[in-house]
Image (cartoon, rainbow, N blue to C red):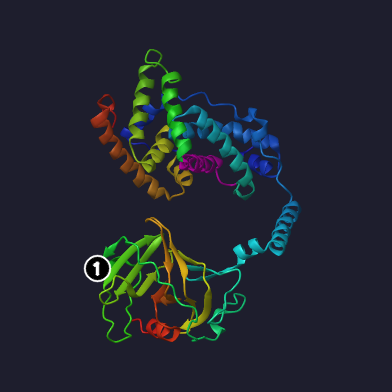
Amino acid sequence: MSEQQWTQGEEQLVQIARAFPYPTTPVLLARPTTFPRQRRQPLQVLALAIAVIALFVLALIFSPRLRATVTNFWQIGVVRLFLPEVMETPTAEPVDISTPAVETPVSTTPIQQPIQQSSPWPPLAGETLLVTATAQLPFPVRLPTYPPDLGPPDRVFLQRRNGLILILLWMAPEKEQARLALFQMGSDAWISKGDIKVLARTTVHGHAAAWVEGVHILQMQGEQEGVIRLVGENVLVWVEQINGESVTYRLESDLLLEEAVRIGESLE
Amino acid sequence: MTETETIARAQAGEEEAWRALMQRYQQPVFRLAYLLIGDAAAAEDVAQETFTRAYRGLARFDSTRPLRPWLLQITRRTVYNRQRSLRRYAQALGRLFQQQRQTAPSAHEETEAQEQALHLWTAVQRLARSDQEVIYLRYFLELSVGESANALGVASGTVKSRSSRALTRLRQVIETEFPELASYG
């Protein structure tokens, strides 16, 4: 063995370990099936890669279902928005995911279809105080300064969904429903939204943002129990760089787009 | 032929060169797997898988570096990958129990030194996985600090500090649970 400088205690340990009754080392060479074959030549690898890609492209062309699965989502920060295969009559401009997000104009048309009542917030784990949550998050917590009489959130939750998610709720007077919910998520968190009927591009402070109108499904997975909730409110999702950290914001309310953007831009 | 030359030949696809390397290192690979798993059959599977993986990655291996720490690093990872599956882990525990009854040397067959070594192994198994690893590499397989660092993927200084901590914890276990070993250290 190579140069060893044992202490006396280590030397004794080695002496004891040397007597360890290992089972007989098996003859690994006796298994011809496990010996790997000669490596593939680079050209073979290239041909194989091209064949796999070609098969995938063909599958995309001939399978609308696969195409929808692979291409029909839009990622804003840590929020993945799954688009419908067929858009219902949009009330805001539907997303064209092939174009840059920031250049699409904003639609402020009120939605025509009635919003179904969202399912109430399920009992959320991790209720805490704002000051406690602030101390644990790797990014600064920002609160809306608009509308001026909004005040601090009524309830604060800090959840671990791969990364930390801060959920701030402003409750409707004398109701158990939240009138405003603001999520703040670091880059390790992960949530998704599905069954979206209307999706439009907009901006918050010049940052690409998604505007989801009407009923859709919110899914949050992670270390804590998963949450699947039917959302009947409108939702604004955007990302900002705060002190070098990418923070995704999700604002849920019954407000129209202009108001939601105004609240989003009032965060301080 | 030096090890560097043998590795270079194996990298060029010479099966005989690869067989020579396997023959040279199958014992430490198998032994580390056995120490970590405690089951000879599973350790053999791990050793076989280790060499298969190593062969697949051989083209990217720097032939000027020693092969043994690299192989032992793959061995560790292979053991962990296997143990991630709860089902396999449960099977391994079952086999361990069976093997302890069937294949471990009986009290009559064991020499006193072997018995002491088995007690030491049992004591090491009480430690955290990272402590076990450094003790197996340094004191059971007698790797140098540098080789252990390569096998663990850490700096040499980390190996020294980990060894020191692991030995302190081992002494505590020995003093409380294996007083017959307490003369060591």
Q: What is the magenta segment's predominant secondary structure?
A: helix
Which residue is pictured at 27% across the width and 67% down the height?
Answer: A135
Name which residue lies at 64% across and 48% down: B59
Determine the residue located farthest toward the top in the rendered image.
B108
User: Per the image, is B68 magenta?
Assistant: yes
**Label 1 chain ID:** A
Residue at the (44%, 50%) spot, across then down: B154
Percent x, y of residue B35: 44, 32
Q: Is residue A13 magenta-colored?
A: no
Q: Is residue B10 visible?
A: yes
Secondary element at tag 1: loop
Q: Residue at x 39, y 21 (%)?
A: B114
Q: Nearer the viewer, residue B158 or A78?
A: A78
Nearest the eye: B56 or B58: B56
Going by the image, does A68 lie left or right of A260? right
- Between residues B136 and A12, which one lies in front from this camera angle? B136
The answer to whether A96 appears left or right of A213 in the picture is: right
Whether B16 is drawn above or below A102: the answer is: above
Q: Quadrant of the C terminus of chain A?
A: bottom left
Front residue of this view, candidates A259 and A167: A259
Residue A244 in view in this figure: no
- The x and y percentages for residue B34 are 47, 31
Amino acid bearing label 1:
Leu
* Residue B110 against residue A26 in the figure, above or below: above
Is residue A196 depicted above or below B60 in this figure? below
Which image quadrant for residue B172? Answer: top left
Q: Percent from the top left, x then y, of residue B90?
A: 44, 34
Q: Residues within 10 Å of mark 1 (few under 14, many from 20)?
A: some
Magenta segment range?
B64-85
Q: Which residue is mark 1?
A: A129
Image location (x, y in percent) of residue A27: 59, 27
In the picture shown, does residue A190 fall above or below B134? below
